[in-house]
């Protein structure tokens, strides 16, 4: 990578870490909120649902206005708005104000993914590898946020967890001013020539070809499982393990064990990014999807060290899929289509995925917390189905292009 490409990947990686980290403060302090506001799992799930729903809500308009405002302005709106929302949540004196702060946090945070993925695939030539690095950095945020927020909340209260996480948003906003985010000339030329080839179809239709729809659907299923499992993972780890470490209470322990599990995602994301550079990506995507299925089911029936081991394996493969899915979308779109395409991609995924919090909360309250992961396994099964159909279409197209003599 050239220097400017490295700067973009570095900024995007740090930003990705905090974009996801902000969302995981809520799961980390969930047990404290349950105690202070006397809430059940279903009510907590609904609050998480609102936050994750708004986290998808702005992805579509964010993707659509990417070309209009440019990545830098959109980036500043995203992180300055997120910082203000975190401060509002920290200052909340009622459940209503807290929910409003979390909803706004989701709205501003939702701008990030279409912006970052369009920026990376438009600026960096080796974008499969760059997306893997970007995803791995995001997983560092996913891994560290529950533990950091849990420790802060245990010692200072849950409001301080939100307040301390506001500081990085200010620093990232200042850093972004000095980074060149404009697309590289080679990527501009590629996007223009590719879009000319596609100009025979309608403007809207090119975003909804069958392969792209399958990529959208696969990401929807992945997001549903992702949101549902992350919302209740710290609480599940706290309830289903009997470890005694460093005199940590259940909130901090659940956050720490979740962080250990999510650290596997760093390796998974990086590995998925490397594999995304290889040919026949559709087949590899199908295989990895299928491998992850039995491990999430088994998490419902285990405790202690076995549960921790199964969770490590499941989340490794689950995060392995993310850069592969993102790269598939980039491969099926022209460079100057990717802002809107990633907007659609993340909008449908995050909005549908937000329902997983309420779904998981309902399952936990009615059937028990351990059945959450069995319920979420259905989304992985559908993901495998969509990946299978996509791979069959790819093989059919390849066969049509290379007929037997």
Image (tube, grey):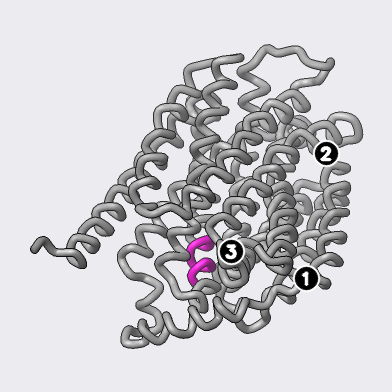
Q: Is residue 250 left or right of residue 222?
A: right
Q: Nearer the viewer, residue 69 or 92?
A: 69
Give the mark nearest the N terminus, 2 or 3. 3
Residue topped by disc 2: 158
Give the mark nearest the N terminus, 2 or 1. 2
Q: Secondary structure at mark 3?
A: helix
Q: Is residue 402 left or right of residue 113?
A: left
What span is in magenta? 341-347
Q: Secondary structure at mark 1?
A: loop
Measure the alpha-carbon separation of dots 1 and 3: 16 Å
From the top left corner, tell me how far across and down residue 101 is, in percent: 76, 55
Mark 2 neighbour density, 10 Å: few (under 14) some (14–19) many (20 or more): many
**Furthest residue to the right?**
156
Residue topped by disc 3: 117
Examine the rendered structure and indicate whether residue 294 appears above or below residue 398. Answer: above
Examine the rendered structure and indicate whether residue 148 appears above or below residue 186. Answer: above
């Amino acid at each position: 990578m050239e220097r400017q490409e490295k700067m973009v990947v570095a900024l995007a990686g740090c930003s990705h870490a905090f974009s996801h980290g902000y969302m995981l403060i809520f799961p980390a302090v969930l047990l404290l909120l349950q105690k202070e506001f006397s809430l059940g799992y279903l009510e907590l799930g609904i609050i998480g649902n609102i936050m994750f729903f708004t986290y998808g809500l702005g992805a579509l308009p964010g993707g659509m206005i990417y070309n209009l405002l440019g990545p830098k302005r959109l980036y500043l709106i995203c992180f300055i708005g997120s910082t203000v929302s975190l401060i509002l949540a920290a200052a909340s004196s009622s459940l209503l104000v807290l929910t409003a702060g979390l909803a706004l946090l989701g709205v501003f945070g939702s701008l990030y993914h279409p912006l970052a993925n369009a920026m990376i695939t438009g600026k960096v030539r080796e974008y499969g590898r760059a997306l893997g690095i970007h995803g791995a950095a995001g997983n560092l945020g996913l891994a560290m946020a529950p533990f950091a927020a849990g420790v802060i909340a245990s010692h200072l209260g849950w409001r301080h967890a939100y307040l301390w996480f506001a500081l990085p948003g200010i620093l990232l906003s200042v850093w972004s001013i000095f980074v060149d985010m404009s697309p590289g000339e080679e990527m501009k030329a590629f996007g223009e020539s590719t879009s000319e080839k596609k100009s025979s179809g309608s403007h809207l239709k090119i975003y909804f070809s069958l392969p792209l729809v399958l990529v959208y659907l696969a990401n929807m299923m992945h997001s549903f499982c992702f949101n549902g499992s992350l919302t209740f993972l710290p609480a599940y780890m706290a309830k289903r393990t009997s470890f005694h470490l460093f005199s940590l209470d259940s909130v901090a322990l659940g956050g720490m064990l979740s962080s250990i599990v999510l650290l596997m995602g760093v390796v998974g994301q990086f590995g998925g990014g490397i594999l995304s550079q290889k040919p026949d990506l559709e087949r590899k995507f199908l295989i990895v999807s299928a491998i992850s299925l039995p491990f999430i089911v088994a998490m419902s029936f285990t405790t202690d060290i076995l549960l921790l081991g199964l969770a490590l394996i499941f989340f490794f493969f689950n995060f392995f899929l993310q850069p592969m899915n993102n790269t598939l979308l980039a491969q099926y779109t022209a460079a100057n289509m990717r802002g809107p395409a990633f907007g659609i991609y993340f909008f449908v995924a995050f909005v549908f995925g937000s329902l997983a919090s309420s779904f998981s909360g309902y399952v936990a309250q009615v059937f028990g917390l351990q059945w959450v992961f069995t319920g979420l396994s259905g989304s992985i099964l559908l993901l495998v189905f969509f990946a299978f159909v996509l791979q069959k279409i790819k093989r059919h197209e390849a066969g049509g292009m290379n007929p037997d003599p």
